Amino acid sequence: MLTGILKPTSGKIQIDGIDPQKNRIQNAKNIGVVFGQRTQLWWDIPIEESFTLLKNIYEIPDAVYQENMRLFHEIFGLSEFIGRAARRLSLGQRMRADLAAALLHNPSTVFLDEPTIGLDVGTKEAMRELIQKINREKEVTIILTSHDLRDVEDICERIIVIDHGQIICDKRIDQLTEEYPMDRGLMITLLNMRPELLGRLKAMEGITSVAMADAFTLELTFTPEKHTAFEIVKEVNDFAQIQDFKLTEPSIERMIEKIYRSGEVKK
């Protein structure tokens, strides 16, 4: 609906003051779109020829086109595959080319629909870094949809959660961490320990779970308002010899789960 492809059954949509259904051509000049499993590249011709066609379709001035291509070669590493046809690209290469194609005409807003779907772990990470880079360097507003909450956690500053057609949360991620405080995790590797350690930890207020993952690995969660990680490590050190420890922050996935469970519709 935001791109003008579908018409809403009710309500209104505007992007920069433009109705995307009534002014589809004008809106298309101002936006870029990347669909995770579809491409806007011509399947059987080299990528560079697809870019030339898009330059003509969007009537991009030569100077703007050359500058953008220079930047995209630097950001997306286009040189390694720009001479190949789209059908000969790996999924990661095609997603990079699609992202460059969506940005070629300097849109003010880019819609990314599941941009990391089907990518391997390393390529997903690279794609997230690219999205952040174009947001900073091109100052493009990015609206991203994803079922992979790692995308949201790594890329987004603001998150909107929809449940049965209702917006139940619309906040910056840093606000979420304050409004929905979550227990932090601590994993401690021990060389040895006294048997009373577990009982001591379980009796401490603010420690919400304690377990031994194996004979030498202690895992626990705690409420940061009650204890600091340093205080807990110091307590464990009185009953055991510590080899190493690792602090883990709550994931955005657990926060979203808590928002759904809360059942509170936020205006």
Image: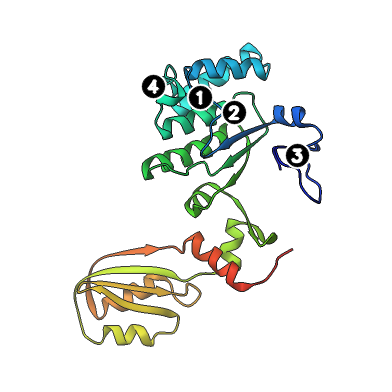
**What's under tag 1, amino acid-wise?**
Phe
Q: Residues under labels 1 and 4: Cα distance?
A: 12 Å
User: Which numbered disc flags the more N-terminal residue, 1 or 4?
Assistant: 1
Query: Dot 3 surroundings within 10 Å: few (below 14), some, or many (20 or more)?
Result: some
User: Which numbered disc flags the more N-terminal residue, 4 or 2?
Assistant: 4
User: Which numbered disc flags the more N-terminal residue, 3 or 1?
Assistant: 3
Percent of width and height locating residue 174:
58, 58
Percent of width and height locating residue 37:
51, 38
Q: Residue at x 45, y 80 (%)?
A: 206
Q: Can you tell which quarter of the image residue 210 is in?
A: bottom left
Q: Which residue is mark 2?
A: 103
Q: Which residue is mark 3?
A: 15
Q: Residues under labels 3 and 4: Cα distance?
A: 36 Å
Mark 3–mark 4 contact, CB under 8 Å? no
Q: Which residue is mark 1?
A: 72
Mark 4 lies on a secondary structure that is: helix
Q: Residues under labels 1 and 2: Cα distance?
A: 9 Å
Q: Which residue is mark 4?
A: 80
Q: Residue 154 or 162: which is nearer the viewer?
A: 162
